[in-house]
Image (cartoon, rainbow, N blue to C red):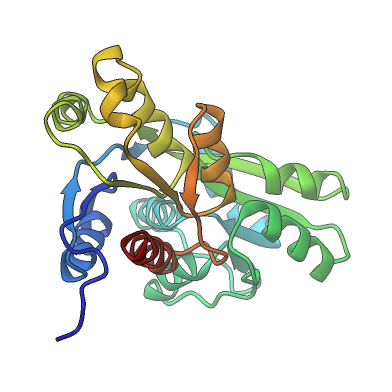
Amino acid sequence: MIPLPLKGKKVFIPRSGKQGKDLSEKIGKLGGEPYLIPLIAFREGKDPRGREYLNNLNQYDWVIFTSQNGVEFFFQHLADQNIFLSPKTKIAAVGDKTKESLERHHIKVSFVPTLFSADDFAKEFRDANTHAKKVLIPKGNLARDTIAQSLKSEHWLVDEWIIYDTIFPVESRKRLASLLEHIQLDFALFTSPSTVRHFMEIAKEPKLLNKVKRIEFISIGPVTKKAIEEYGWTVSTSPESYTVDDMIDCLCKLNMKREEI
């Protein structure tokens, strides 16, 4: 019989929709008990320059996508306005999952970095494209401006379109408070700084702190890790490749090592 690396461990998952469901199923198959409460939800952004970006879309040399959500909101706008991308416009994605989202829309992706973070993207993209060009970055309201600032420093023309907003679902606040009060979690998985911030809004309550202190925090990458540490908490493990599957692999290895002690 194959041992289950997360047997009996209570694992908190802050993702929503299909992503949350898929992650919960993976944790369950590994023997863990997933507790799924979406800490982020997404709605269409109200960028006042959105229409201008659409009208001038084919003037951009590159469109850079930093998330799957950015892809979906972008193509919804194109469909609503019956606008099509020019074949001359090149597309870049910050990681494999974003690339896969673009390919589902039958879009050829011309650039993906070897490491999936905004910092790595900015350096590799800039090094691979030595001549300054005009770029559009559809992004969320809480996304950093790392890529834009890096390209602007090399005299690129960059527009950032706030195409969606990230919010903390009202119904999730009470659910999270109740979970932290009544269940002692073993691990909490964090996939973005937004999930960290929303979790900490509730976890800072004095009556919850003793239980929160016993949770081991797992981050998907360095930016999320930094967000956790800024609240004074320690990250137990984080993968070298910033994907959910690698994060789960790190969690399993960590727990198996704990069990051996």
**Residue drawn at the location 56% of the way across and 74% of the way down:** 109
Q: Residue 243, can we see it?
A: yes
Locate residue 233, reporting x and y percent.
48, 33
Question: Which of these two is toward me, 175 or 238?
Answer: 238
Extreme residue toward the top, this view? 206
Q: Quadrant of residue 106?
A: bottom left
Query: Relative to residue 42, is residue 170 drawn left or right?
Result: left
Image coordinates of residue 120 in percent, x first then y, are 69, 59
Residue 168 appears in the picture as rendered? no
From the top left corner, tell me how far across and down residue 121 is, in percent: 68, 60
| Image height of 244 relative to 40, above or below | below
Q: Is residue 134 above or below residue 98?
A: above
Q: Nearer the viewer, residue 210 or 136?
A: 210
Q: Is residue 86 left or right of residue 208?
A: right
Q: Residue at x 49, y 44 (%)?
A: 235
Q: Say which quarter of the image contains residue 46.
A: top left
Measuring from the top left, give residue 136's x and y in whole percent. 63, 51
Q: Is residue 67 left or right of residue 5?
A: right
In the image, farthest residue toward the front: 261
Q: How many marks?
A: 0
Which residue is more in the foreground, 165 or 2? 2
Q: Nearer the viewer, residue 207 or 258?
A: 258
Q: Quadrant of the C terminus?
A: bottom left
Image quarter hosting the N terminus = bottom left
